[in-house]
Image (cartoon, rainbow, N blue to C red):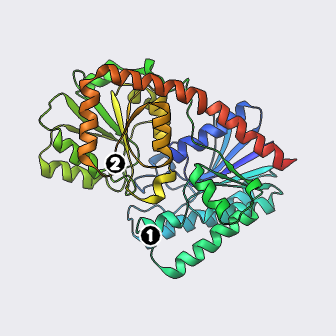
Amino acid sequence: MKILFLTQYCPPEVGAPQNRIFEFAKQLRKFGHEVSILTAMPNYPKGEIFDEYKGKKIVLEEVDDIKIIRTSIYATKEKTFTKRLRNYLSFTFSSVMTGSKYIDKQDVIITESPPLFLGWSGYVLSKRKKAKYVFNVSDLWPESAVKLGVLNNKMFIAMSTWLEEFCYRKADAVTGQTQGIVDNIVGRGFGKNKVHLITNGVDVNLFKKENRDEAFRKEIGVSDKFAICYAGIHGLAQGLEVIVEAAELLKDNNNIQIIFIGDGPEKQKLISLKESKGLNNITFLPVQPKKNMPHIIASMDATIIPLKKLDLFKGALPSKMFEALASELPIILAVQGEAEALIKKADAGIVVEPENAKEIADASLKLYNNRELSVSLGRNGRKYVMENYSRDAITRKFEKILVEIVK
């Protein structure tokens, strides 16, 4: 098959959507399909076009045998609603124009949402390229934006809801990243037979405990400490200030260090909070190259995965969870719902109440004081993810859906 991924986010940017889509593309290419990606000039999360792409309107390149077509986008460091909207819409229209010119006939076009507006682009391109239209939902929008308080204009909410449902109706297949997303879409009356669960997964050969790097631990000053990391986007949804508050409760224990890895709109706020509290048990690291993440994750002793205490996130399965599981890290999970059920079933971590700093601190101490428990939880996680969430098996399931709709 000739398969095109349409996504605003793609490596060399780092982040969950970027990694997931590129890994799917690589696996499908390995299975013998011709795979292309139509995406924006890299600019996430800083809102600034990467140096090597500045001043360019179109970039055609090939990475791991995958053709990548990059087109223009309005990049902005400001996070106001108007600037965000301009960012999304700029790529919505440029992707249609560039795709029409540089993409040949396809069998399938897979469109990643959010941003929701890209659903329209994917539909238009699917008609122009005589392709089947697959709409992949990694986050329910506009629902999530409304519940996070990012979107409150009633007219815009109504317009966004109309576009969301338009995409569901027109798609030959809809794929949801969690059971909660799938249930939401099906529960609103969209065909059960065309809505499929395609979860996050992980390359278990890439993420493993054997990647542990003592030189890296020494470099960041944790060679003799119990290092607990948060690795990912520093955004509003994660509510990361609770980790800083937990670190304050742990400040008298000099053997536990909290490591933040990554970037995002809330990072400076977190740094300021740490400094105002005078905490020395928190280290902030910048965004790391994707190729370095397997050894960075494996070099930690545990990980914290939080989300805000909202019903919206009861259907979330954060991708960083699977990388930690594969790397045999015990997880302190501050998320309710699907992720909670998974960690409990796998017996791979300690589940705490979201936004509860004391419970996070207590769980950190429990893992630090009981290394046997930490090792046991880590082993359980690796076993569970190998059996249920290997990237290869999930991509095979995805491939089967694509083959069926093309038939």
Percent position of residue 244, x then y: 23, 47
Quadrant where the N terminus is found in the figure:
top right
Q: Closer to the camera, 395 or 54? A: 395
Taking the image as shown, residue 216 lies to the left or right of residue 340, namely: left
Q: Residue at x 28, y 36 (%)?
A: 363
Q: Nearer the viewer, mark 2 or mark 1?
A: 2
User: Rounded to the nearest whole Å, what is the CA distance between mark 2 and mark 1?
Assistant: 34 Å
Element on which disc 2 rests: loop
Identify residue type, mark 1.
Answer: Lys
Q: Residue at x 47, y 28 (%)?
A: 381
Residue 301, placed above or below residue 125: above
Q: Closer to the camera, 214 or 302? A: 302
Residue 158, placed above or below residue 70: below
Identify residue type, mark 2.
Answer: Glu
Residue 141, picture quadrant: bottom right
Taking the image as shown, residue 1 lies to the left or right of residue 67, namely: right
Q: Which mark is residue 118?
A: none
Element on which disc 1 rests: helix
Find disc 2 in the rendering and name its residue. 353
Q: Residue at x 41, y 59 (%)?
A: 310
Find disc 1 in the rendering and name its residue. 83
Give the crowd class for mark 1: few <14, some 14-19, many >=20 residues within 10 Å.
Answer: some
Q: Is residue 351 visible?
A: yes
Q: Closer to the camera, 363 or 152? A: 363
Percent position of residue 38, x then y: 65, 51
Residue 141, placed above or below residue 344: below
